[in-house]
Image: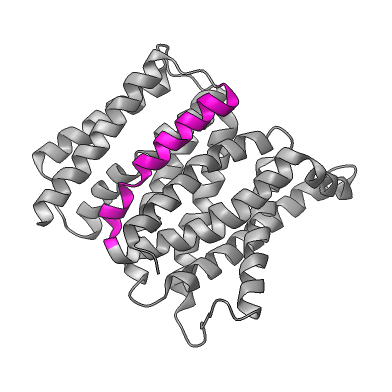
Amino acid sequence: MAHPYLAAIMTSFIFGFSFMFTKEALDYVTPQQLLAFRFLTAALTMTVLRVLGIIKINLRHRPIRKILLLSLFEPVLYFTFETTGVNLTTSSEAGLMIALIPVFVTILAVFTLKEIPHPLQIVSILASVAGVGFIVLGGERLTTSGHTLGLLALLSAVLAAALFNILSRWLSREFRPVELTYVMMWVGALFFGGSALLETLQQPDPLGVLALLKIKPVWSAVLYLGILSSVVAFFGMNYYISKLGASRSAVFVNLSTIVSVAAGILFRGEPFYWYHLVGGVLILVGVWGTNHIAHRRSR
């Protein structure tokens, strides 16, 4: 198995490009349809690997309900909010907002692990919150527009991801990373597949949704998100969280942020204003401070 830091870097790059693929596919399909295609592809891929004996899954007489709880936060809640948020914002903004995950992990650790943050960590957290303020306001008043609702959806995704980080670390004592990933993919496939089916049945031509898979941005996104960003990346995430712990693992979201912002600007020509720069710097400085201080205190 690869070194946990190497796995974390690889996973961060995969997640970083996922926002761009998601944004491109959402020009043709609904969020529910994309999520259904994504997780059905991921679940079937893992099932084929299991049948071929490439991966081994043993869930008999195991507390699967614990993995179901994990799956509620991610993929169900996280991707519901993330895909909605990306649909209403840009991939660059989504990447910046997701950078708040390490800060949320630190805050939740106070209640779940009884870890009291250092005063400088509190300052760092406030810096990240200020950064979010710059991005959300964008020089204007807070409104109930689709853009603002998209940013709020991304914040909800951040909270779900933070809870996932803590639960994944907890469950790593009982389950192997591949077992966690296998159940997560099937929960996502059943949940999003079911909701997309209900959505599609209300359309005049339900079978027409299959024709969408012929569109290059759609099938390329489904393959990237279903295989790389779901199977490979989630296995990598569950693996390095089990080795590094929740707080130290969460800092690698920073790398995903840099990749997603660069991809949005370079490949999609997305705008990048001064308040994005200021907000992004504040978020990253706050995230770095939160985790750097935590690392020094753990020595």
Q: Is residue 277 above or below residue 236?
A: above
Q: Is residue 255 above or below residue 65?
A: above
Q: Give the residue at x 54% y 38%.
A: 19
Q: Give the residue at x 61% y 34%.
A: 23
Q: Give the residue at x 47% y 30%.
A: 262
Q: Give the residue at x 19% y 38%.
A: 289
Residue 265 at x, y = what percent? 51, 24
267 or 239: nearer the viewer:
267
Q: Which image quarter holds the N terminus?
A: bottom left
Q: Quadrant of residue 30?
A: top right
Q: Is residue 148 above or below residue 201?
A: above
Please indicate, yes or no, whether residue 167 appears anywhere in the rendered image.
no
Q: Could you tell whether 163 is left or right of 41 in the image?
A: left
Q: Is residue 53 above or below residue 29?
A: below
Residue 162 at x, y = what percent? 36, 51
| Magenta stretch contains residue 261 | yes
Please indicate, yes or no, whether residue 71 appears anywhere in the rendered image.
yes
Residue, far bottom: 61
266 or 75: nearer the viewer:
266
Q: Which image quarter holds the C terminus?
A: bottom left
40 or 257: nearer the viewer:
257
For the image shown, how many numbered marks are present on the structure?
A: 0
Q: Which secondary structure dominates the residues rendered in magenta?
A: helix
Residue 210 at x, y = what percent? 83, 49
- Region in magenta: 244-269
| Magenta stretch contains residue 109 | no
Q: Could you tell whether 104 is left or right of 70 in the image?
A: left
Q: Quadrant of residue 24?
A: top right
Residue 92 at x, y = what percent? 48, 29
